[in-house]
Image: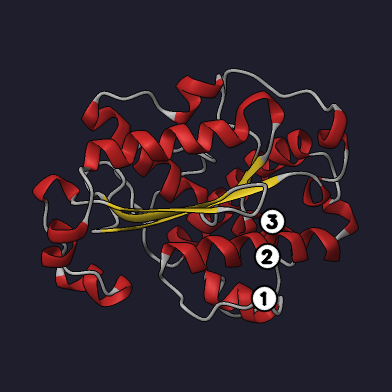
């Protein structure tokens, strides 16, 4: 992390009451180093939604990924825009929202979406969001917040599960637009529900770094106690070492 935004203006408010943008992408796989963005959406702080469909630069969409987001290789190749142009526009749009403290960025399971975008930037030789902004913060991750605030609740913590739990509409799950909007709604509901999370954006970002590391260490220890002696759970957040699965 290269810099820390200081609280000023709207950023001195609790993060969920300040300006928020939200990003989501659908991909052709779960390896953040090698897989590609198929579709992406950015909900800007002013409510406008930007959307992208990539031609994947000719890469394929395996059946497993197609079954999730319903976009085929043929459709992406025929209707998508050049992948390099899409990646450039996504990075530029996110940076535009985050620059000069304009908005915190909501990303559900940030250590998947953000490293994958960085890998796409590296692939095409374009500047990452962090290159453009000077840092990759503040980020708000509903998954990290929910795990910390309600750690003993049973059940799944997918976006669909969180949307149901926090009573946020999600009618087209696994489409980038719907997921970005739902993640934003879930994040705000979490912020409203837990007074201990009602901090300025730059402070909640730093807390999430520690909370995710703590969760990862505990989960790794749990897996190893169950016989998975080589289990490794990456504790870095919101970026992580490229190549991991979500």
Q: Residue at x 66, y 47 (%)?
A: 45
Q: How far across and down, in percent of the image, does residue 36 sit?
A: 25, 49
Q: Is residue 160 above or below residue 234?
A: below
Query: Tag 2 or tag 1, which sits nearer the N-term?
Result: 1
Circle nearer the viewer, 1 or 3? 1
Q: Is residue 131 left or right of residue 145?
A: left
Q: Is residue 96 above or below residue 237?
A: above
Q: Are marks 1 and 2 in contact (CB under 8 Å)?
A: yes
Determine which quarter of the picture holds residue 128.
Answer: top left
Q: Are marks 1 and 3 in contact (CB under 8 Å)?
A: no
* Quadrant of the snapshot with the C terminus: bottom left
Q: Which mark is residue 63?
A: none
C-alpha gap between disc 1 and disc 3: 16 Å
Residue marked by disc 1: 168
Q: Residue at x 14, y 45 (%)?
A: 57
Q: Is residue 143 left or right of residue 191?
A: left
Residue marked by disc 3: 145
């Amino acid at each position: 992390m290269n810099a820390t935004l200081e609280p000023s203006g709207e950023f001195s408010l609790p993060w969920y009451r300040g300006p928020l943008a939200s990003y989501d992408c659908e991909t052709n796989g779960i390896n953040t180093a090698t897989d590609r963005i198929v579709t992406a959406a950015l909900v800007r702080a002013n409510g406008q939604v930007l959307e992208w469909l990539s031609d994947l630069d000719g890469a394929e969409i395996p059946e497993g990924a197609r079954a999730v987001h319903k976009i085929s290789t043929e459709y992406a190749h025929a209707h998508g825009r050049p992948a390099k142009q899409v990646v450039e526009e996504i990075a530029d749009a996110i940076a535009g929202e985050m620059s000069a403290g304009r908005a915190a960025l909501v990303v559900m399971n940030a250590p998947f979406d953000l490293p994958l975008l960085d890998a796409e930037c590296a692939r095409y030789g374009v500047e990452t969001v962090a290159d453009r902004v000077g840092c990759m913060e503040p980020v708000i991750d509903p998954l990290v917040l929910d795990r910390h605030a309600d750690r003993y609740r049973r059940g799944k913590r997918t976006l669909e599960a969180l949307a149901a739990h926090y009573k946020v509409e999600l009618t087209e799950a696994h489409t980038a637009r719907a997921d970005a909007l739902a993640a934003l709604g879930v994040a705000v509901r979490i912020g409203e529900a837990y007074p201990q999370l009602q901090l300025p954006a730059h402070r909640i970002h730093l807390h999430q770094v520690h909370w995710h590391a703590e969760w990862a260490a505990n989960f790794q220890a749990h897996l190893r106690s169950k016989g998975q002696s080589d289990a490794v759970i990456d504790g870095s957040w919101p970026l992580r070492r490229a190549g991991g699965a979500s």
